[in-house]
Image (spheres, rainbow, N blue to C red):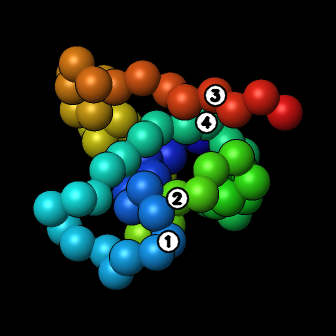
Amino acid sequence: MIYKVYYQETKQRNPQRETTQSLYLEADTEVDARVLVEDNTEYNIEFIEPLEGNFLDYEKENPEFQLTEFNK
């Protein structure tokens, strides 16, 4: 499944909507998605959203849509 992960680049500051960023990744579960991001970045995860059906199709229309892959 594809997940959209909303995050802040650092854990040192409180989350601010204006600085929230996102990435897309493929994982088996939401827990796996969280572990992938936590193990490979210093990001402060705000929310993880599963994408499927029309929601995924909509996100794929965004020119910024690109799956993030981490080296295992």
Residue 1 showing in the rendered view: yes
Q: Distance between the Cα atoms at labels 3 and 1?
A: 21 Å
* For the residues bearing labels 4 and 1, Cβ distance under 8 angstroms: no
Horizontally, is 21 left or right of 71 in the view? left
Q: In this figure, which residue is indicated by the disc labeled 2?
A: 43
- In the rendering, at what x and y percent does residue 7 appear? 41, 59
Q: Quadrant of the C terminus?
A: top right
* For the residues bearing labels 1 and 2, Cβ distance under 8 angstroms: yes
Which residue: 70% across, 46% down? 40
Could you tell me the amino acid type at mark 2? Tyr
Q: Is residue 32 above or below residue 25?
A: below
- In the rendering, at what x and y percent does residue 15 appear? 31, 75
Disc 3 versus disc 1: nearer the observer: 1
Crowd class of label 4 (few under 14; some 14 to 19; many from 20; radius 10 Å): some
Which residue: 52% across, 58% down? 43
Q: Kindly identify which numbered label has been placed on residue 11.
A: 1
Horizontally, is 60 left or right of 18 in the view? right
Q: Distance between the Cα atoms at labels 4 and 3?
A: 8 Å
Disc 4 versus disc 1: nearer the observer: 1
Q: Nearer the viewer, residue 68 or 15?
A: 15
- In the rendering, at what x and y percent does residue 48 appear? 47, 61
Q: In this figure, which residue is indicated by the disc labeled 3?
A: 69
Could you tell me the amino acid type at mark 4? Glu
Could you tell me the amino acid type at mark 1? Lys
Of the two numbered discs 3 and 2 on the same chain, state the one appearing first in sequence.
2
Horizontally, is 4 left or right of 68 in the view? left
